[in-house]
Amino acid sequence: MESKTLYILAPCYNEEEVLPLTSKIFLDKLNSLIDAGKISENSRVAFVDDGSKDKTWEIIESLHELDPKFVGVKLSRNRGHQNALLGGMSTIVDDCDMIVTIDADAQDDVNAIDKMVDDFNSGSDIVYGVRDSRETDTFFKRTTAQGFYKFMSMMGVETIYNHADFRLMSSRAVKALLEFKEVNLFLRGMVPLVGFKSSTVTYDRAPRLAGESKYPLKKMLTFAFDGITSFSVKPIRFITALGAVTFLLSIIFALYALISYFVSKTVPGWTSTVLSIWFFGSLQLMAIGIVGEYIGKIYLESKQRPRFFIEKYLK
Ligand code: UDP
Ligand code: MG
């Protein structure tokens, strides 16, 4: 069987510190797979520059000059990790048979790619990289990330547990993914919706090789919130249910108030009045907020703005 073409795709945002190290790791992996005859000579390592403000693009250009096995895609500005991934995939999809997406900091174990390619060759269209342990993550990152997966599934968003954006996709799976026209991207929720045959490969996640995380807590929370509100209407249902329950409670309360009025004639009403103002006030604010969140999503989606622009493609 003729070997297939693999592109290893890494999004980069201000990664000048880590790229010189990890580009070599990716290239070595690519070359070893080519030498083993598992993938074709046309395989490449592709970097997407997500509007970096440092020397990232210059580094990608010089890598490309050094070795044509490196290719680069430059977005016109910073559009965030998820858009960078999709922008990169859409640019290279016609040049290859499969794409492995991986973070530029090589925290995910490149050796898992061997098994991913094997799975692809035995018929999988999507191979999810799944983290075995999180020992190398800080306690904070580990607990927040695991809480995130649990909360997502509670909210009815189907994701693969402990899988981030390290995965192999066949070109037809990528093309299917590109058919999703939504602007609020949450790839790890969208990819399972594509279907086709899939499998998982487990690996250990290492610490970042250099530089700092480009996902501070604020970005992480926004990402989680976007993931939930883009994929689940459970929060709205929850509020409807909450409304129903409080309605029942208020009927009981009204009965109680009426009865005590007739029985004892005087009702010292201050506490209950103040409490209910606060309670229902906050409940209503929360409800309006969540509904507003979805209206905001509809607003963004209805504009159908383009998700990214490719400024350059070095191939
Ligand atoms: N990234 C990106 N655009 C952004 C933020 C991050 O392309 O706006 C890339 C970043 O360069 C890296 C990947 O997304 O390749 C994951 O980021 P990072 O490793 O900082 O996240 P963490 O591993 O800390 O969750
Ligand atoms: Mg990282």
Image (cartoon, rainbow, N blue to C red):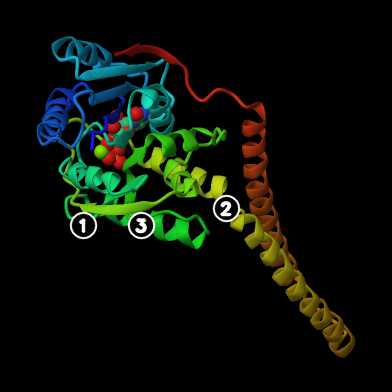
How many residues crowd mark 2 within 10 Å: few (<14), some (14–19), many (20+)? some
Residue 89, above or below 123? above
How many residues crowd mark 3 within 10 Å: few (<14), some (14–19), many (20+)? some
Query: x, y (%) of residue 172?
Result: 43, 36
| Residue type indicated by callout 3 | Tyr
Please identify the quadrant where the C terminus is shown.
top left
Q: CA distance from mark 1 to mark 2?
A: 28 Å
- Residue 183 visible: yes
- Residue at numbered disc 1: 133
Quick one: label 3 or label 1, which is nearer the N terminus?
1
Please identify the quadrant where the N terminus is shown.
top left
Q: Residue at x 50, y 55 (%)?
A: 157
- Residue at numbered disc 2: 232
Mark 3 and mark 1 in contact? Answer it, CB < 8 Å: no
Q: Residue at x 18, y 9 (%)?
A: 65
SS type, badge 3: loop
Q: CA distance from mark 2 to mark 3?
A: 17 Å
Q: CA distance from mark 3 to mark 1?
A: 12 Å
Query: x, y (%) of residue 153?
Result: 46, 60
How many residues crowd mark 1 within 10 Å: few (<14), some (14–19), many (20+)? some
Q: Nearer the viewer, residue 97 or 29?
A: 97
SS type, badge 2: loop
| Residue type indicated by callout 1 | Ser
- Kindly give the residue lying farthest to the front in the view shown: 1
Q: Residue at x 82, y 76 (%)?
A: 254
Ligand 2 lies in quarter: top left
| Residue type indicated by callout 2 | Ser
- Residue at numbered disc 3: 161
Q: Nearer the viewer, residue 268 or 209?
A: 209
Q: Nearer the viewer, residue 167 or 149?
A: 167
Instruction: Name which quarter of the figure residue 219 lies in.
Output: top left
